[in-house]
Amino acid sequence: MKPALAFLGALVVFGGSYLGSTQLGLRTEGFLDVQVEASKLPSYAAVGQDLYTPDGTKLLVTSITRERSAKSVKHVIHASVKGTHRYALQLFPTRMVHTFSMDRQAIERTLLEAAGMPQGEFVATTRQWHLVP
């Protein structure tokens, strides 16, 4: 009876650690820098402002820059997004994976609207885990 309980206990510990490291991982709150390209000259009034997406995610518009290429000039809106970082173990290939939970479409929409570019009708989306390079 004792060997069976010991085996069952070891199986529970192994299964729990596997689930905890691969699915749950270590979670922390923090910020992630996001960049959104604007098609035309944006308004700089939103720089330094705290914005909120429809689901309540907090954004801080940090800057708007111009990037010149051989063919055109792009305007890039930079913002810091507050959310949840997750560090989890990926088994195949074995490595630690850093992901961030955010609703990318809602963030892009909010930033472009704050920069003076209307986005049309609202479309509801959901949060997803995005891989952080």
Image: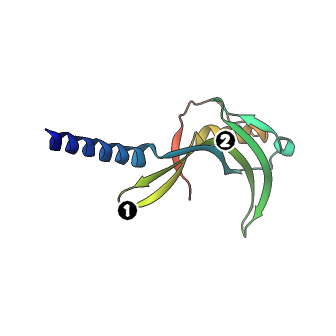
**Which color mode does the image show?**
rainbow
* Amino acid at dot 2: Lys
Q: Quadrant of residue 46?
A: top right
Mark 2 and mark 1 lie on one chain; the one further toward the N terminus is 2
Q: Residues within 10 Å of mark 2 (few under 14, many from 20)?
A: some
Question: Which secondary structure lies at badge 2?
Answer: strand
Q: Residue at x 58, y 44 (%)?
A: 28
- Location of mark 2 (residue): 82
Q: Residue at the location (40% across, 55% down)?
A: 90
Q: Quadrant of the C terminus?
A: bottom right
Q: Percent x, y for residue 81?
A: 67, 43
* Left or right of residue 115, residue 3 in this image: left
Q: Residue 101's spot in the image, x, y percent?
A: 55, 42
Residue lying furthest front in this view?
Answer: 2
Q: Is residue 101 above or below residue 35?
A: above
| Camera-nearest residue between 115 and 101 | 101
Badge 1 amino acid: Pro
Q: Residue furthest right?
A: 45
Compared to 127, does 34 lie above or below?
Answer: below
- The quarter holding residue 11 reads top left
**Tag 1 residue:** 93
Q: Are marks 2 and 1 in contact (CB under 8 Å)?
A: no
Instruction: Measuring from the top left, give residue 57's x and y in whole percent.
Output: 66, 35
Crowd rating for badge 1 (residues with CA inside 10 Å; few <14, some 14–19, many 20+): few
Residue at the spot 73% in from the left edge and 51% down from the top edge: 78
The Cα–Cα distance between marks 2 and 1, rounded to whole angstroms, is 29 Å
Of the 4 image quadrants, the one containing the N terminus is top left
Q: Is residue 32 left or right of residue 89?
A: right
Identify the residue at horizontal 65%, vertical 45% (top origin): 30
Residue 84: mark: none
